[in-house]
């Protein structure tokens, strides 16, 4: 059974940075693509970024975070990171990581395994 645990969320001022971690247990992370999604109050869950399996050479970002967020992976630590810089109040949301053995996708419904989420609040 694959389990994902997010950490690193918190309260930060606009313009600040946070690094989220998604640690996988139960299986090796190598063969899984991993995505980050977020859900703000009253809104649908939306795609943020994903990274391909193994070397993680394939990445994709939502337009809203391009140039500010960076996804990376450390297969030795079984962890995927989301570095978030130049944070804006509109980045406030619960952030979820999800893992998938299938093709990379921005569609949340196609991910097999999910973490419980970590809250990010960006204040003015």
Image (spheres, rainbow, N blue to C red):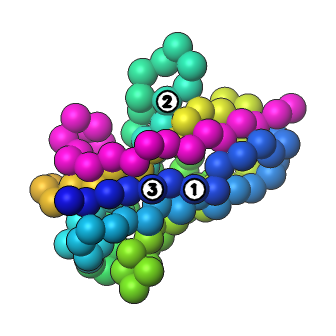
Does residue 73 belong to the magenta stretch? no
Position in image of residue 52 (x %, y %): 29, 66
**Residue 68, label in figure:** none
Is residue 26 visible to the viewer in this orientation of the structure? yes
Q: In the image, which residues are magenta?
A: 105-124
Does residue 122 belong to the magenta stretch? yes
Pointer 3: residues within 10 angstroms few (<14), some, or many (20+)?
some
Q: Earlier in the sequence, mark 2 or mark 3?
A: 3
Q: Residue at x 19, y 41 (%)?
A: 110
Tell me whether the residue at label 2 lies in contact with that at label 3, contact meaning CB atoms closer than 8 angstroms: no
Residue tagged by mark 2?
A: 39
Position in image of residue 57 (x %, y %): 33, 74
Q: Residue at x 50, y 54 (%)?
A: 6
Q: Quadrant of the C terminus?
A: top right
Pointer 1: residues within 10 angstroms few (<14), some, or many (20+)?
some
**For this view, does 36 lie left or right of residue 119?**
left
Residue tagged by mark 3?
A: 5
Residue tagged by mark 1?
A: 7
């Amino acid at each position: 059974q694959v389990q994902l645990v997010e950490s690193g969320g918190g309260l930060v001022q606009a313009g600040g940075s946070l690094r989220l971690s998604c640690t996988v247990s139960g299986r090796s992370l190598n063969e899984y693509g991993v995505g980050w999604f977020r859900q703000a109050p009253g809104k649908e869950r939306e795609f943020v970024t994903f990274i391909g399996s193994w070397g993680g050479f394939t990445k994709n970002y939502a337009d809203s975070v391009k140039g500010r967020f960076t996804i990376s992976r450390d297969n030795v630590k079984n962890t995927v990171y989301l570095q978030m810089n130049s944070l804006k109040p509109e980045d406030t949301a619960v952030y979820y990581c999800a893992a998938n053995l299938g093709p990379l996708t921005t569609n949340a419904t196609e991910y097999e395994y999910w973490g419980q989420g970590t809250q990010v609040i960006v204040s003015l």
